[in-house]
Image (cartoon, helix red, strand yellow):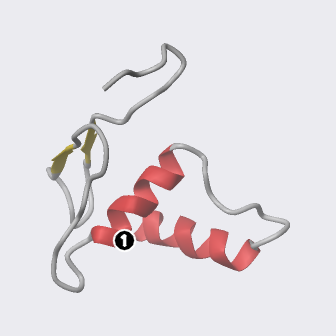
Amino acid sequence: MNHSLNSHRIRCISIIGGFLDGTKFELADGLNCFIGARGAGKTTMLEFVRYALDALPSREEQPTERRRIESLVEKNLAG
């Protein structure tokens, strides 16, 4: 796969704290798929990435959605 020098990739996600404590996701180039039962943490993990990359919805345009994600991160990482 030919990657531009200006591209960025997330290779690994490690979670410290909360109910996913100690979980580590190694990501492959291209498409990655998270499969698991309801409540396994799939959405939570993706919201952690959005939070870490500061890619949350804007406070002005979607304040409720932003608060939902911030609350999810706070509750799952125990502050």
Tell me the residue that label 1 is attached to.
43
Image coordinates of residue 22 in percent, x first then y, are 14, 50
Q: Which quadrant would the N terminus be assigned to in this image? A: top left
Can residue 8 be spotted in the picture?
yes
| View extreme (front): residue | 1
Q: Which quadrant would the C terminus be assigned to in this image? A: bottom left
Can residue 79 be spotted in the picture?
no
Q: Which residue is depicted at the point 82% across and 69% down?
A: 61
Image coordinates of residue 37 in percent, x first then y, are 16, 83
Image coordinates of residue 25 in percent, x first then y, are 19, 48
Q: Is residue 37 above or below residue 75?
A: below
Residue closer to the observer: 20 or 5: 5
Q: Is residue 53 above or below residue 75?
A: above
Mark 1 element type: helix
Q: Is residue 56 above or below residue 12?
A: below
Q: Which residue is depicted at the point 27% across and 37% down?
A: 29
Which of the 4 image quadrants contains residue 20? bottom left
> Residue type at mark 1?
Thr
Q: Is residue 29 above or below residue 38?
A: above
User: Horizontally, is 40 left or right of 6 in the view?
Assistant: left
Q: Which residue is depicted at the point 39% across and 60% down?
A: 46
| View extreme (right): residue | 60
Residue closer to the observer: 43 or 69: 43
Image coordinates of residue 57 in percent, x first then y, are 68, 63
Number of marks drawn: 1
User: Horizontally, is 63 left or right of 54 in the view?
Assistant: right
Which of the 4 image quadrants contains residue 19? bottom left
